[in-house]
Amino acid sequence: MSEIFVHETAEISEEAKIGTGTKIWGQSQVRENSVIGDNCIIGKGVYIDFGISIGKNVKIQNYANIYHGSKIEDDVFVGPGVMILNDKVPRSVTSTGELKGENDWKTGEVLIKKGASLGARSIILPGVVVGEYAMIAAGAVVTKDVPDYGLVMGNPAVLKGSVCKCGKKKCGDGEC
């Protein structure tokens, strides 16, 4: 059975669960109560907030940020600098001017389904579901759900077609 590799500069909470064969590279942070599946690769400088669920065979590239309320299923690719966000109305203080505490946040959830790919520097807003094997173009700002095998691009992201399981533009029946 393959061991877990954690770079000496990574910060992993003792309350996180890391699957076998997973590699976590330098300066990454995995917060409490997060679960990372088997055979994942977590690149340099990745931030995984508390309570995150990540499936198996997931590759998260350098400097991606995944915030509380996110779930990533198996076989997902998360490109460099991707932001998976959880607050549509971010403020540092309450309406009365008090610094917001943990109970003042209204967390929006994000679900990234099996086999999806999130291009470099894409931004996924809260309340979004990215469908199975969907493809998000680099730099896209995803504000709405993406269908299974959907290809979206732009700001805001719009549906531009569909892709096969292999990631290429759809060949017809979805088989490559």
Image (cartoon, rainbow, N blue to C red):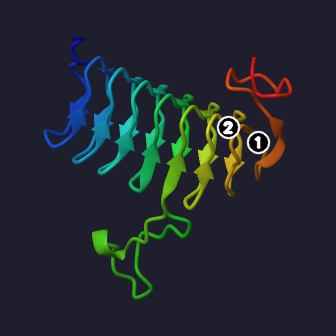
Q: Which residue is mark 2?
A: 134
14 sits left or right of 5 in the view: left
- N-terminal of the pair, mark 2 or mark 1, is 2
Mark 2, residues whose alpha carbon is within 10 Å: few (<14), some, or many (≥20)? many
Where residue 10 sits in the image (x, y, percent)? 26, 27
Q: CA distance from mark 2 to mark 1?
A: 8 Å
Q: Residue at x 28, y 44 (%)?
A: 34
Q: Secondary structure at mark 1?
A: strand
Q: Quadrant of residue 132?
A: top right
Q: Which residue is mark 1?
A: 152
Q: Residue at x 49, y 25 (%)?
A: 61
Residue found at the far left of this picture: 14
Where residue 140 sits in the image (x, y, percent)? 71, 42
Q: The disc labelled 2 sits on which kind of residue?
A: Ala
Where residue 155 sits in the image (x, y, percent)? 77, 49
Q: Does residue 85 show up?
A: no
Q: Residue at x 78, y 41 (%)?
A: 153
Are the residues tagged 2 and 1 within 8 Å (C-beta)? yes
Q: Does residue 131 show up?
A: yes
Q: The disc labelled 1 sits on which kind of residue?
A: Val
